[in-house]
Image (cartoon, rainbow, N blue to C red):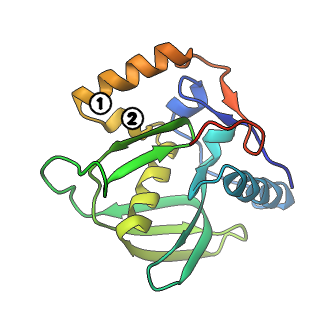
Amino acid sequence: MAVHPIRITGDDTLHSPAAPVTVFDDELRTLVADMFETMDAAPGVGLAAPQIGVPLRIFTYTWVEDSGEHIRGVAINPTLWITPVPAGIADEDSEAEGCLSFPGERFGLRRGERAILQAVDVDGEPYEIRAGGWLARIFQHEFDHLEGVLYTDRLDGHDQKIVAKLTRKRGWGVPGNVWMPGVDDLDA
């Protein structure tokens, strides 16, 4: 297993739809193991393959529910069903998201309150998870990555201006910018 560098906004892989996984083999298992290791090292609650430069429809996730239940897995070739996004302005405290591909910042973003994730695992076995709260948010965030969408693309006009300013200031927004979990401290 290996920790991979994480691509920062501007990389073409992050802004293009990912391709379906068609081969389920040891190479895929290694990629998924590397994704878990990278996600944990960041640390993050989710990681999509495009974030490490692999344009495939895969994401890993990990979350601990208030009940103490630990939910951890991989979604390959997922479909995601979500409830409508509630009207109104996002709460900066309870709805703030961050992203490993726009490290060090958090912005409020409204998301659907519930989601149904349908996917397959590394063996090609289908599964379904019905999620609410933060797990539903994680699924939506990671699924967006597979569509070539970053959460910063979904922000309102005021926050979009802040994102644009930060992107210019940090030299992001172009291919080639990465950071290495466990080495670089970017407060993602």
- Return the x and y of residue 9 as percentages of the image width and height: 53, 28
Residue 143 seen in this snapshot: yes
Quarter of the image for residue 165 reads top left
Tell me the element at label 2: helix
- Return the x and y of residue 83 as percentages of the image width and height: 25, 64
**Of residues 158 and 24, which is closer to you in this image?**
158
Tell me the element at label 1: helix
Measured in 3D between alpha carbons, the distance from the residue under mark 2 to the one under mark 1, in whole angstroms, is 8 Å
- Which quarter of the image is occupied by the C terminus? top right
Taking the view exactly as shown, the residue that stands out farthest to the left is 87
148 to 36, vertically: above or below: above
Disc 2 crowd, CA 10 A, few/some/many (<14, 14-19, 20+) = many
Residue 55 seen in this snapshot: no
**Of residues 188 and 81, which is closer to you in this image?**
188
Compared across the picture, whether 152 is left or right of 87 comes to right
Q: Are marks 2 and 1 in contact (CB under 8 Å)?
A: yes
In front: label 2 or label 1: 1
